[in-house]
Image (cartoon, rainbow, N blue to C red):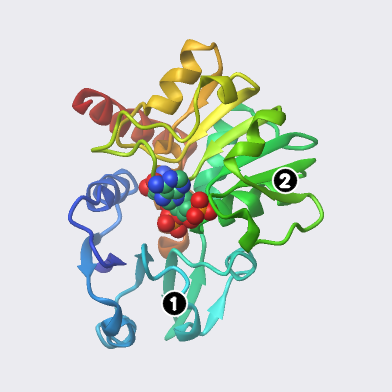
Amino acid sequence: MNIYGLFGESLSHSLSPEIHKQIYSSIDANAAYTLFPFSPDKLPHAIEGIRTLSIKGVNVTIPYKESVLPYLDDIDQHAKQMHAVNTIHQKENKLIGYNTDYDGFGLIFERRNWKVEGKTAVVLGSGGAAKMAIYYLKENGAHQIYVVSRSPEKYQNQDIIHFIGYNDLSHITGDFLINTTPVGMYPNIENTPVEESIIQSFDCLIDLIYNPYETRFLSLGKSLNKKTANGMDMLIGQAVKSVEIWEDVIINQEITNQLIDEFSKRQDEQQ
Ligand code: NAP
């Protein structure tokens, strides 16, 4: 049996074991997935544990997506560019790092046939998920990317990437407005990172949050007839891509779609 798991600090609410169980069952993989929570001082031991215990792969979440990098033998090109790894594969005694959040984020656009090329996008927040989103948007030919931070002065603009504050947002119109902040996440579900007057100026809204299933940000968008997407495609998409790497398989898009529908329904019912 192949053993997989999730490295992170606080994992008790993770949906990953259930998602992975369903993926393994849908492809008849003889595999198990478990949570490996540990504190930052234990990171070198945890990495050594992958080698010692012949664990075939792990996902990596907050706060280890960057700090695992020096421990890996090789890093995939996208992950290297983003300076973040969310998937480690042990192959021929080597640990190889990937970033399948990139693929999960891409799935949001692919499933809706939303094209990035030539478009203007605004990314709310400047953390790990924002860096991945900015990289994706740039790789896929965005025309302009505005990154909205509470402290834009910390950053330097780079060609199409402009850092701005929340007060500057009222002057900007665009195609995509993407929330990568935790604002609006359970239990603070009444919060929204921006109000209707800002949302009004965009066509498509993406919230990386999936709990609640529909954040206030997205429900405001819906009431203004905007196209919306939450973070469930990304959550399932990154898991599916990790399994494709670990098990060396191509997973049918139908299976991914079914998983998104099933977990979306569950989250929606909980709301
Ligand atoms: P992170 O590294 O902590 O970054 C979050 C960023 O949001 C911060 O850098 C900050 O940017 C901004 N922020 C934080 N608190 C804020 C507040 N109270 N008000 C306004 N802005 C605030 O976290 P992350 O890993 O990027 O994750 C961010 C979100 O994405 C979380 O909600 C997470 O659940 C979600 N996510 C979803 C998936 C998925 O699979 N769907 C995967 C990864 C992450 P500034 O300081 O520049 O304002």
Which of 170 and 110 lies nearest the eye of the viewer?
170
Quarter of the image for residue 263 reads: top left
Residue at image x 43%, y 65%? 87
* Residue 202 point in image, percent of width and height: 64, 24
Quarter of the image for residue 230 reads: top left
Residue at image x 22%, y 47%? 18
Q: Name the residue type under label 2.
A: Asn
First in residue order: circle 1 vs circle 2: 1
Which of 144 and 34 lies nearest the eye of the viewer?
144
For residue 67, the mark is 1
Q: Name the residue type under label 1.
A: Ser
Mark 1 Cβ and ligand 1 under 8 Å apart: no
For residue 160, the mark is none
Q: Secondary structure at mark 2?
A: loop
Relative to 105, say whether 92 is above or below.
below
> In this figure, which residue is indicated by the disc labeled 2?
140
Specify the quadrant that holds the C terminus. top left
Task: Give the label, 1 or 2, closer to the camera.
Answer: 1
Specify the quadrant that holds the N terminus. bottom left
Q: Is residue 9 left or right of residue 216?
A: left
Residue at image x 53%, y 50%? 150
- Residue 235 in view in this figure: no
Which of 86 and 83 lies nearest the eye of the viewer?
83
